Image (spheres, helix red, strand yellow):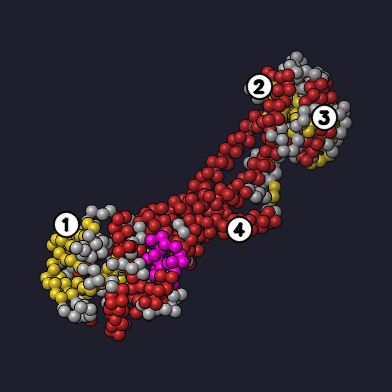
Amino acid sequence: MTLRWWRLAARNLLRHRRRTFLTGSIVVVGYVAATMTAGFVAQTFGGLKDITIRGQGGHLRVVSAEAVGKTDEEAAGLLLDDAEELTRSVATSPDVRQAMPRLSFFGLVAHGDRSVGYMGTGTVPALEKSATLAAEAVAEGTFLSDPEADEVMLGGGLARSLGVTVGGLVTVMTTTPDGGLNAVDAEVVAVLRWPIKELDDRVLFLPYAPAARLLKAEGRATSIAVTLKEGTDLERAAGALRARLHRTGTPAAVKTWIESAPFYVAVKRLYAAIFLFTGLVLATVVVLAAANTMTMSVFERTREIGTLLAIGMERGQVRRLFLAEGLLMGLAGSVAGAVASLLIRAAVNAARIELPPPPGATSGGALHVELIPLAFGVGFVLMTVTLLVASWWPARRAARLDPVEALSHV
Amino acid sequence: MTAPLLSATALTRTYAVGEERVVGVRDAALSLERGELAVLAGPSGSGKTTLLNLLGLLDRPDSGRLELLGEDVSTLDDRGRARLRREKLGFVFQSHQLVPVLSAEENVALALWIRGLPEAECRVRARAALAAVGLAGMEGRRPDAMSGGQRQRVAVARAIVGEPALVLADEPTASLDSETAARLLDLFDALHAEKGIAFLFSSHDPRIVERVPRRVRLVDGRIASDERTGGGAT
């Protein structure tokens, strides 16, 4: 189609400015809704991913080869030998920012006459502080500082269950790998506000040394938590680390954070399904509105279409003219939608609207809609294709009109 | 021997109205020479417009044969008929039927756009056609800024811009006052005389019927008479 036909299509759209504006507004709303939802979902995924990675201690975990296919609880007793040397070796990998040994253990923690089940982590305080959620989660007290001290940090829910505050003493009890019971008395140096409620009720941190003594697992670790350098490809780094362990004959496996995050995967799937459903509803509304507009346009211009056919316009040209009108409306609506989306996004982010905590979380956060260029591109294509689809039937109807009947249309 | 411009043999067209079939045109036979001026006359419902639609390749007969410039058009598909309409025929309708969002020049050029001619050529020819119908200087006006007579002249310009062999005009003066209608008829005369374009009108307007040298009268879908006056042009 040459420029003159596009010009005619554009002028035809402006015949009924109000109607075109209303239909275009629906396209704009659909576009804004799609891009804003994508931005919000991306923020949610980003936040959840960050929490999940830092909650696990890093992007990768080196675990016992026997831990493959087992849950963290099942694999807690499967320890890596010579953790110090292994940690040093992993830390020298080019993609690795830091590596730290961690011990995972479970048991009861008691204060006074109260005892509550916990999920414990023995860690290197300085490294834990720099790479994981724990440092940001300190609500009261100060982060663990002495790697040898019998000090403990408790989740807020756990501390409340025990009725203990910072400075209080608790007894941490667990079962050692050989089946014996062991306990350590530790001072509560910090109470955490862990973002996931179930964990807030259970989480407990001890420095690595007292944790190893408690478990009678000196020099060993449940995992080596690995934080990668910014921008490193997860799968490539995991592959390189696996190859390195294989070369050195180390009986260990490498798990990516996503392999240990079924919750993240499930939430992502759920959001994707919601996004798809919302998109379908939006597309349907846009299709119906645009199809209605185009159908009315065909009806009103029946005699004109009859004239065009009479003077020799081919049916294909008539069809293309109406499709061009739909396409132009989609393009114009998308451009306006992109501008509106950018403005609304800026306003929403500037307003710093506080969101309530999501289910299972202990705190919300400010609503922040990310700018997703891909969503803008996809929205553009989707809205344009949607308008083309909506125009197809009216365009076909126009092209199939009988010129004699069309010319006598009143 | 040159083939006639138009040759129709035993054209019949019926329509379904409920369960009955109503005759629009029955056994119509008509031949039109190049450059001829003729009118299909008759009262309302006599079949003038139906026959004009058949001869203008807008409608298909139930039976009969139609030749345009020696080519049998009875068996042509939609595309073939559209090609002949845009290349060999021109149309003027009772109401001007202009595209309201296009200027006078663009409305005329539209008949050339659909042939895919270059924009510059379309513009030059559209301006020339507008000048030929006395609308030089009004190229940029839209239909809603023109009088009824001017609009009908734009429609005539659109019909002749493609240099057709035949212009079919269905009740072209029906919506015009006497003075405007007279000027339009003068224009048809002039175009016929200057460009040698054949015109076939459908009308019961005596202003046309009395001026046209050949009068084909229809009654109840049949050609009742075919009269020629000796005056040549009107």
Q: Earlier in the sequence, mark 2 or mark 3?
A: 2
Q: Earlier in the sequence, mark 4 or mark 2?
A: 2
The amino acid type found where label 3 is placed reads Val
Image location (x, y in percent) of residue A277: 51, 45
Can the viewer see residue B83 in this picture? Answer: yes
Residue under numbered circle 3: A124
Q: Chain of mark 2?
A: A
> The residue under label 1 is which amino acid type?
Ser
Q: Position of residue B197 (x, y in %)?
A: 28, 71
Q: In which chain is the residue bearing label 3? A: A
Between the residue at mark 3 and the residue at mark 1, the CA separation in whole angstroms equals 98 Å
| Residue at figure coordinates x 81%, y 32% from the top left | A127
Residue drawn at 80 percent across, 24 percent down: A89
Give, as a three-letter code, the residue at label 2.
Val
At numbered mark 2, what does the secondary structure look like: helix, strand or loop?
A: loop
Which residue is under mark 1?
B63
Residue A80, image x, y percentages: 75, 19
Say what amino acid the circle numbered 4 marks. Answer: Val
Mark whose residue sits in front, 1 or 4: 1
Tag 1's secondary structure?
Answer: strand
| Circle count | 4
Between marks 4 and 2 in the image, the one whose residue lies nearer the viewer = 4
Of the numbered discs 3 and 4, the one sitting upstream in the chain is: 3
Please report the bounds of the magenta region as a residue range: B99-123
| Vertical relation: A145 (above or below) B209 | above
* C-alpha distance separating marks 1 and 4: 60 Å
Query: Is residue A285 at least partly visible in the picture?
Result: no
Q: Which mark is residue A339?
A: 4
Q: Quadrant of residue A70?
A: top right
User: On the rendered structure, is B219 left or right of B36?
Assistant: left
